[in-house]
Amino acid sequence: LNVSGSSLGGNNTDNVDNLGLKVKLNDMGDSMPQFALGLVYKKASGPLADYLNTALGTNTSSTDVYAAASKIVNIGGKNVLLNGVLRASKANQMGLLDFGGGTTAGSKTSYSIKPEVSAEIFASDNVIFGAEYRAQPSNGVTATDTVLHQNAAYDFNVVYVASKNFTLTAAYVSLG
């Protein structure tokens, strides 16, 4: 996240480092989706993360926990990958703006469980069209939730699979 033009001075690039673990619980069957459990440790760094930590008392790290279900179905002769996730998270903007609402009275510091859904349509053997939606927690620190308020994130994408080792992806992404 580049926050150039801000009054934070110096290096205005924030980062989120992620370290994850995902365990597949079963194989996908004809009528059974594949289920998985996972966790992702996230650590925010940079001037904006430091500022929010100092000004609001937000945390610079947290761990998301999630459960996912995936299934390939045939719709109109095309394979469609459907995926649903329930994620417990404290992240503000997926961790780019730290975690939790901080120490200010009225802020939200506990985990929120939010849904994520995606669908990818295999238009041909090597072209895929898809969309994703992700609800995000609002850890606002005021009664009207105006600080650290988040809208849902979503994207639309198209993927060209040139080989098993090379793909091209174009996407429109809104982080909320």
Image: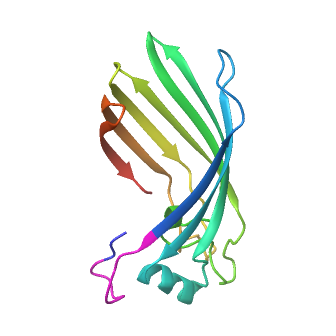
Which segment is the magenta one? 4-15
Name which quarter of the figure residue 11 lies in.
Answer: bottom left
Locate the C terminus by quadrant.
bottom left
In this rendered view, identify the residue nearer to me: 140 or 120: 120
State the residue at coordinates (33%, 34%).
Answer: 159
172 is higher (above) or lower (below) than 58: above
Task: Judge left or right: residue 122 versus residue 67.
Answer: left
Residue at screen point 43% across, 71% down: 15
Query: Where's residue 47, x and y in %?
Result: 42, 83
Picture coordinates of residue 27, whole percent (x, y): 66, 27
Q: Is residue 175 above or below residue 126?
A: below
Name the residue located 43 percent from the left edge and 80 percent from the top edge: 46
Q: Which residue is at the front of the view, 168 or 170?
A: 168
Q: Name the magenta segment's main secondary structure.
A: loop
The magenta stretch spans residue 5: yes
Q: Is residue 81 magenta?
A: no
For the N terminus, give its image quadrant.
bottom left
